[in-house]
Image: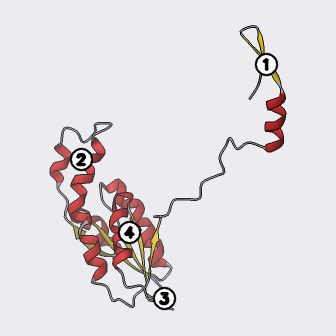
Amino acid sequence: MSAPHFVVVTIGSAGDLFPFMRVALALREQGHRVTMLGPSQHGPYVAPTGLDFHGLPADEAVLDHPDLWHPTRGLAVVWRATRPAMAQVPAFVAALPPEERIVLLVHPLALPEADLCRARRVHVGQRHRIDQGLSKAPPQPAARHQRHPARHRIRSQQQRIVHGRQVRRR
């Protein structure tokens, strides 16, 4: 089986770009094929690294939107602004050779498109699948307040006093 092609998708500011770019560089150093997709204005930051980069459209007017930094409405502004760029991700992945194994490493705002890529990609065994990096929620720890059967039985038999009256504890 050939090494996977890592498609790294980022969106947002340079603060979003640089962590993904560092991961992309580490993958390339390990011998993987890596392609970065990100806002076209980030091209000058990526070019010196030699990474394969495909620019996505970005509307910088969103930076002047009055609700951008609003605590409850800001995310909706960012979401709407990133949809045109993210809409290009499935087309990019669809244009890749169907026999190529692909791993998508995406910004959280690109998770819907990454899932769409995975659903549209031809699935024939392990060779044609998309591994979607960072898209699955980590396993959740056991509930903090699970009842221990013996402890519950003991506590239910205890007595307590409420407003001067003795009541059974449930």
Between the C-alphas of marks 1 and 3, the distance is 62 Å
Residue shown at the point (82%, 37%) measured from the top left: 153
Q: Nearer the viewer, residue 158 or 11?
A: 158
Say whether disc 3 or disc 4 marks the residue closer to the N-terminus: 4
Quadrant of the image occupied by residue 19: bottom left
According to the picture, the residue beneath numbered tag 4 turns out to be: 115
Q: Secondary structure at mark 2?
A: helix
According to the picture, the residue beneath numbered tag 2 turns out to be: 77
Q: Nearer the viewer, residue 117 or 164?
A: 164
Classify residue 81 as left or right of residue 160. Answer: left
Say whether disc 2 or disc 1 marks the residue closer to the N-terminus: 2
Q: Amino acid at mark 4?
A: Asp
Whether tag 1 and tag 3 are in contact, CB under 8 A, the answer is: no
Other residues around mark 3 within 10 Å, as few (<14) / some (14–19) / many (≥20)? few
Q: Secondary structure at mark 3?
A: loop
According to the picture, the residue beneath numbered tag 3 turns out to be: 125
Between the C-alphas of marks 3 and 4, the distance is 18 Å
Classify residue 89 as left or right of residue 166. Answer: left
Residue shown at the point (55%, 59%) measured from the top left: 138
Above or below 141: residue 167? above
Q: Amino acid at mark 3?
A: Gly
Q: Position of residue 137 (x, y in %)?
A: 51, 59
According to the picture, the residue beneath numbered tag 1 turns out to be: 160
Above or below 80: residue 8? below
Whether tag 2 and tag 4 are in contact, CB under 8 A, the answer is: no
Q: Secondary structure at mark 4?
A: helix
Other residues around mark 4 within 10 Å, as few (<14) / some (14–19) / many (≥20)? some
Between the C-alphas of marks 2 and 3, the distance is 40 Å
Q: Nearer the viewer, residue 50 or 3?
A: 3
